[in-house]
Image: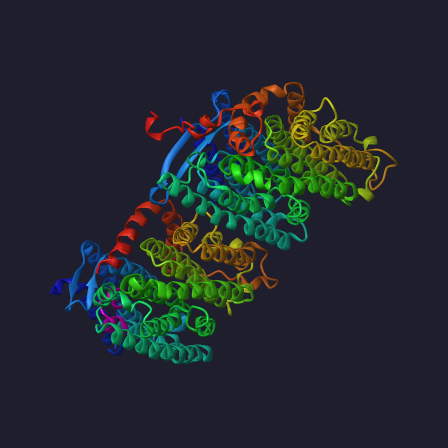
Amino acid sequence: MNAGAALTLYVMAAVTVAAIVLAVVPLPASARRLPEAIGIAGIVATLAITVTQWGERQVAFNGELRIDRFGLLMTWVIMIAALATLLLGWGEPAAAGRRREFTGLVLAAATGMMLTVMSGDLITLFIGIELLSVSLYILCAMEVARERSLESGLKYLITGSIGTALLVYGFALLYGVTGTTSLAGIATRLDSVGGLASDPLLIAAIVLIVVALGFKASAVPFHMWTPDVYQGAPTPVTAFMGTGTKAAAMGAFLLLFTGATSQASGDWRGLIGALAVATMVVGNVGALLQDNVKRMLAWSSIAQAGYLLIGVAVGTTAGAEALIYYLFAYVAMTLAAFAIVILREREVEDGDQLTAMAGYGRARPWAGVVMTLAMVSLAGFPPFAGFVGKFLLFGSAVDAGMTWLAIVGAVASVISVVYYLRVVIVMWGPPADDRSTVRRLRVPPAVAAVAVTGAVAIVGLAIAAQPMLDVCADAARALIIP
Amino acid sequence: MPWVSLLILVPLAAAVVLGVLPARERRAARGVALIGSLATLAISIIVVALFDRDMAVMQQVDHLDWIPAAGVSWDVGVDGISLWLVLLTTVIFTLGTIAACQRLPERRGPAFLALIMLAQAALLGLFTAGDLILFYVFWEFMLIPFALLIWNWGGDDRRGTGMIFVVYTMAGSLLMLVAIIATALTAMDATGELSFLIRDMQGVAFGEATSTLLLAGFLIAFAIKIPLWPFHGWLPRAYSQAPIVVTILLAAVMSKAGVYGLLRIGVPVFPEGIGNLLIPVAILALIGIVYGSLLAWRAPTMRLLVGYSSVAHLGFIVLGIIVIDRMAAQGAVLQMINHGIVAAAAFAVVMMISRGTGTGDMDRLGGLAKGAPRLAVAFLFVTMAALALPGSNAFVGEFFILGGVFDQYAWMAVIAMLGVIYAAVYMLRMYQGTMNGPVRGVTDDGRAAEMGARDAIILVPLILMMVWIALWPGSLVGATRASTDLALAPAQVAEGRPVEQIGVLPARAAMTPATDPAERP
């Protein structure tokens, strides 16, 4: 046992508790940003620690926690999302008065996500997922004065609970089949007892787990909650759900399937492939019909989950590598897009409507360029990061003999062009009739920083694809080490 | 110097500079755009000067690994197929930039010029890419500037048009991406190395069924971009709604992307597949020749007339490539250049007439020659080139194509001849309808449409190039021959063509001495 290995967890737990305690302690006005500052410091410290820990796997708590390259790299995705969320929420008028608990809850959710991707055991994995879910239930309902926000929180709570219940069932069955809750143990058991693959009990466990994680990753047909919740939640929270939660859910998928049950991949490859196909098709078609940018991004996040699931469905480390790369790209694109939505929301009433974006590119060219980059890259136009990611995902599918996945992905991407580019057209088009709606406020530097960093990452991840892929490949290989 | 890379990077840099210029700096924008396009033109002339006419494979190759793990690299160079297209692109874009600068209305600030520069970089990248992924990157990327140009500065229906243009084209190209990945992975099974370099894939035996399937994936993308009948749905709308300068660029340069892809990738990489798809593609091309000509004949506006005539002309080029005959292929490459020059000149004439009279409707124009004699002379010249009058530049290209096609499939040549006849009908209709007859649609005899010095800067170079090619076609064909022979050879062997028809021994084609990046100084 190596206590130092779990250092990131201690740091995150400490700053989370500190932020929550500070939320109830009356603070002088000069220290009102203290919880956020502590949170940001904690996240930066966590990122720094993960860099020093990069190397061979270390375990903590008797293997309950695995600190390996996979967990560390996924922690990066999650912490970047959390950091961006805190910055996006900086001075958010909607969260006024409750800002300090906002910070604490975001940190708690991020800790849960980190626990999920670093887990070495079904129990830890479950605790991680619950920690992130419960924090997000509250975050969604943060704007208690707004009915939509409350509705969003309630909807997420109900569907999330169903997912949780199914996850426990699935884990219980998996334990019943293999006799162990350790991910490494499960892999070893499936490896040694060849007859276990295609065991009805194992298949039942796999189906339940796929459905439960499908809820968390908002895969079709378990996506119904997503548009309502995304639209209703405060926008920084939506951004966090779209990126952090997605990363954690995909991390869980990879740990449980590509990692632990890879010996039984024949049992789940088709199932997850079908899930990916349904998610890509329904997500992209659903997004076509939206007039609200947040809602459109919700549907787009469903569709993007479909592309990501390709990386799980192929069951290879190449698929995992592509998935992790695409996660980074996806997080950059999504955060950049949400940053612009937040910017607009603060300027006008109903700023998340597509019509509110009319002429925004002309009013603020840099914001227009950032949004254009995000949309164009999400649509998969080369040479941006979204294209490189899709190229790698489709490539892994063709390589694994699942060319049909790549073809559906390609067709779905064509559909997606329509709604992504509609945002671009509207933005660079003429302003809406009422010119007063284009109101220009001072741009909050924190939001601008997220937007610009996202845009830089969209280009940078494509140019420096190779070094990034080397890191992703290391992480993917760590998955299959028993 | 990595001239070929500079060819792409210079317009890209100009686009970035133009992108950050404030909208009111129109003077500076003009300067940057003109310097950028002239510098690119100069570089392309250097590339042509350094070109070795006897070398069949890609030369002046710049190679840099981008994603080695995925076999993707920055690999650009020129060969006989791409050389003249590169020069065509830089010339037409220089003229287009001048045209855009001359009448840079208030709204067409630096952004308009920046997008034109981006489009130029993408097209030059496409014509020089030696790596399939790089080819795809440029193929897709050029959509963005063109779509934004249509959206922001197009006609009344610009929104819908831009969307149709993008979605239509993307539908084909994303399937091409899947085909590209599948091709590289299949080739990896044979060679043991993952590489997207086109020269590494040449000579890989894919097997007939696989080869056909993979080629079909590429062909859909090419057919939409060309456009081959029945995939031409986007063309009339895009050509009539885009700003006229952009229409010139679309018709003259972008329309070559599809046929170029067919000759660069389709024929040499999938020789067995070409054999299977030869007749179907040729039939589509023949339908396109006849159908495009008929539509051009009855087209209500000048833009549509020239647009539909492009469908017919590109049908000719496709036919010249797909019959895998040496002479026809040389004609096809020559005709790509000819069509680029003629289409640019024809749309430039349309631009002048529409600007002078305020309309492009055939019904509302007539008798302009009275007030605009100089324009009439230039227009007549362009008309003669467009209908491939013997002695014109297009005649040489069409003669090469038809001669080659006749050698292989006489019946195809007979049907294709219809297109030559129709061309006379619709081009003369356009000339006579607008220039001769009673004066219609204008109050000043068409004096406003007369070609001034500013217009001459654009039209005269194009006419001079037509004359050059008409008189010395050999200067172009001589440089393309080695490369087209090499591209055709494997397909000719697979088709079992007589040995005397084949230009290079296929053995040489298989062991193409790819320029090894390690050997470069």
Q: Nearer the viewer, residue B97 or A181?
A: A181
Task: Give how far across and how far down residue A179 sits, in percent.
Answer: 22, 74
Q: Where's the C terminus of chain A, which quadrant? A: bottom left
Q: Nearer the viewer, residue B447 or A3?
A: A3
**Residue at the limit of the structure toward the right, as seen here:** B438
Task: Give how far across and how far down residue A137 sits, in percent.
Answer: 36, 77
Q: Is residue A347 visible?
A: no
**Image height of A314 relative to B101, above or below:** below
Residue A194 falls in which quadrant of the image?
A: bottom left
Task: Give how far across and how far down residue A24 sits, in percent.
Answer: 26, 79
B441 displayed left or right of A273 = right
Q: Nearer the viewer, residue A430 or A404?
A: A404
What residue is drawn where x is 54% and y is 24%? Answer: B503
Q: Is residue A18 visible?
A: yes
Q: Where's the N terminus of chain A, which quadrant? A: bottom left
Report the magenta residues as a range: A115-127
From the image, give the main secondary structure of the stretch colored magenta.
helix
- Asked if the magenta segment contains residue A399, the reply would be no
**Image height of B425 relative to A356, above or below:** above
What residue is drawn where x is 40% and y is 81%? Answer: A158
Residue A71 falls in which quadrant of the image?
A: bottom left
- Asked if the magenta segment contains residue A125, the reply would be yes
Q: Nearer the viewer, residue B319 or B26?
A: B319
Task: Give how far across and how far down residue B76 sits, in percent.
Answer: 44, 33
Judging from the image, the colouring scheme is rainbow
